[in-house]
């Protein structure tokens, strides 16, 4: 005969942590754009890359996020640390290890190990030592699930800042026979989607025949179909400025821009399934990146090649057959670089270079000729920049928003949600 002994289940402290709240608190750390590293002290020397993606850095960020969010109160921390002896420190380290492992097991993060050949004479401590190498071995990255979650949280936070908002497709004044019934019915015509209005169809048959006998006598003239508002599809390219000015002057402008980008991509993918969104980074040159790589994108010591970004965005949009095509450009500076015909990059950071400005406005005019709208969100208010952005908006028949990092998300999403468009034939 088998005997079973039951004891009271005591959940571990790591199991009580709300991972979603924790991940939300880690968003600034996970989406860091290079701002923190630009002025941070690097113990391994100025020539080494900061260990911002190491597991040790992640554990420190987790601990700070738990304390800031109230999940891990100072009293709990003091009780866990005890008197600061080795045993209490080991308990704290074990707790952080388990929390990080939960983030990995739940699919929010993934890890990679960089293989390194160790020198037999390599010292244990100091720059280039075994401790330094070990701290760099295991790196973490956001998984697609983590990127989706941060996009969802960013979208909720931004929408919550300006009250209620209903999602839907882009409204137009046109009616069509689709699936959603938003208007009165009309007689069926050849080519209409057979979204049958049963009540009106039977009513027509009864009025024509004066009979309720089953089966009922139906003719083509009796058929009525429901109408719905015509839903247009839109192709969007989100242009993000990654020039070094986005993290200069004591302010990180790129991390909030990335949050807005994640929110916009999440909104389009979940609420506007017929729309598309692509991401282009522009600096000395320009390149398209997959949305999955957006979270890890960082700024660099680059100039601002707006013309090359517009050229690439226009090429992407023209390859898509959509009713609407638009460019959403988030920047904080003047165009200061230009790609020459031979592939060389011409740079001039001193004022507004008329050659650079002229080529940039030429690309803007090409976008207008191709039916592409450019909406610019400027994170600076320099007088010369204001005049330049207004000229861009006038040529491209778009809008210009002069905003800051706090209100950027509201401007971008409200512009997208309130857009009233018509079908382009």
Image: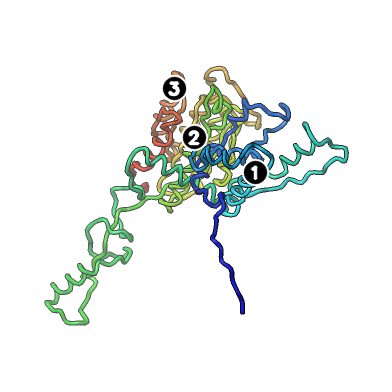
Percent of width and height locating residue 342: 66, 31
Residue 189 appearing in the image:
yes
Residue situated in front as seen by the camera: 168 or 70: 70
* Location of the N terminus (image quadrant): bottom right
Q: CA distance from mark 3 to mark 2?
A: 18 Å
Q: CA distance from mark 3 to mark 1?
A: 47 Å
Residue corresponding to mark 3: 381
Percent of width and height locating residue 181: 28, 59
Q: Residues within 10 Å of mark 1 (few under 14, many from 20)?
A: few
User: Which mark sits nearer the N-terminus, 3 or 1?
Assistant: 1
Residue drawn at point x = 50 percent, y = 48 percent: 18
Foreground disc of the pair 2, 1: 1
> Left or right of 108: which side holds 202?
left
Residue drawn at point x = 67 percent, y = 33 percent: 50
Secondary element under disc 3, as helix, strand or loop, is loop
> Left or right of 284: which side holds 23?
left
Percent of width and height locating residue 338: 58, 28
Q: Quadrant of residue 210?
A: bottom left
Residue corresponding to mark 2: 256
Secondary element under disc 2, as helix, strand or loop, is helix
> Left or right of 70: which side holds 162?
left
Q: Which mark is residue 93?
A: 1
Percent of width and height locating residue 349: 58, 20
User: Which mark sits nearer the N-terminus, 3 or 2?
Assistant: 2
Residue drawn at point x = 44 percent, y = 26 percent: 389
Q: Is residue 382 above or below residue 317?
A: above
Q: CA distance from mark 2 to mark 1?
A: 31 Å
Foreground disc of the pair 3, 1: 1
Residue drawn at point x = 23 percent, y = 61 percent: 185
């Amino acid at each position: 005969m088998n005997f079973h002994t039951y004891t009271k289940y005591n959940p571990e402290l790591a199991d009580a942590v709300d991972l979603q709240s924790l991940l939300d608190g880690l968003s600034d750390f996970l989406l860091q754009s290079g701002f923190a590293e630009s002025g941070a002290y690097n113990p391994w020397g100025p020539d080494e890359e900061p260990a911002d993606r190491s597991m040790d850095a992640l554990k420190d960020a987790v601990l700070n996020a738990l304390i800031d969010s109230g999940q891990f109160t100072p009293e709990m921390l003091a009780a866990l640390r005890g008197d600061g002896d080795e045993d209490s420190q080991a308990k704290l380290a074990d707790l952080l290890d388990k929390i990080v492992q939960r983030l990995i097991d739940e699919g929010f993060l993934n890890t990679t190990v960089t293989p390194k050949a160790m020198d037999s004479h390599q010292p244990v401590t100091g720059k280039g030592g075994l401790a330094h190498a070990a701290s760099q071995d295991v790196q973490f990255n956001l998984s697609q699930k983590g990127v989706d979650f941060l996009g969802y949280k960013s979208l909720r936070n931004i929408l919550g800042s300006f009250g209620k908002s209903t999602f839907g497709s882009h409204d137009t004044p046109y009616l069509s026979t689709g699936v959603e019934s938003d208007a009165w019915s009309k007689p069926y015509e050849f080519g209409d989607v057979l979204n049958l209005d049963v009540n009106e169809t039977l009513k027509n048959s009864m009025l024509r025949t004066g009979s309720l006998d089953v089966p009922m006598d139906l003719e083509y003239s009796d058929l009525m179909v429901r109408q719905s508002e015509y839903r247009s599809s839109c192709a969007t390219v989100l242009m993000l400025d990654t020039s070094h000015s986005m993290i200069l002057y004591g302010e990180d402008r790129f991390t909030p821009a990335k949050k807005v980008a994640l929110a916009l991509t999440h909104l389009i993918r979940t609420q506007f399934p017929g729309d598309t969104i692509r991401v282009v980074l522009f600096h000395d040159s320009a390149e398209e990146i997959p949305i999955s790589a957006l979270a890890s994108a960082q700024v660099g010591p680059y100039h601002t090649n707006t013309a090359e970004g517009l050229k690439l965005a226009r090429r992407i949009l023209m390859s898509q057959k959509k009713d609407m095509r638009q460019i959403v450009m988030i920047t904080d500076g003047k165009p200061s670089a230009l790609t020459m015909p031979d592939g060389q990059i011409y740079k001039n950071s001193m004022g507004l270079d008329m050659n650079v400005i002229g080529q940039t406005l030429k690309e803007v005019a090409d976008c207008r000729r191709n039916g592409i709208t450019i909406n610019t969100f400027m994170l600076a208010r320099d007088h010369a920049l204001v005049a330049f952005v207004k000229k861009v908006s006038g040529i491209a028949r778009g809008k210009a928003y002069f905003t800051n990092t706090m209100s950027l998300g509201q401007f971008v999403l409200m512009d997208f949600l309130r857009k009233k468009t018509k079908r382009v034939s």
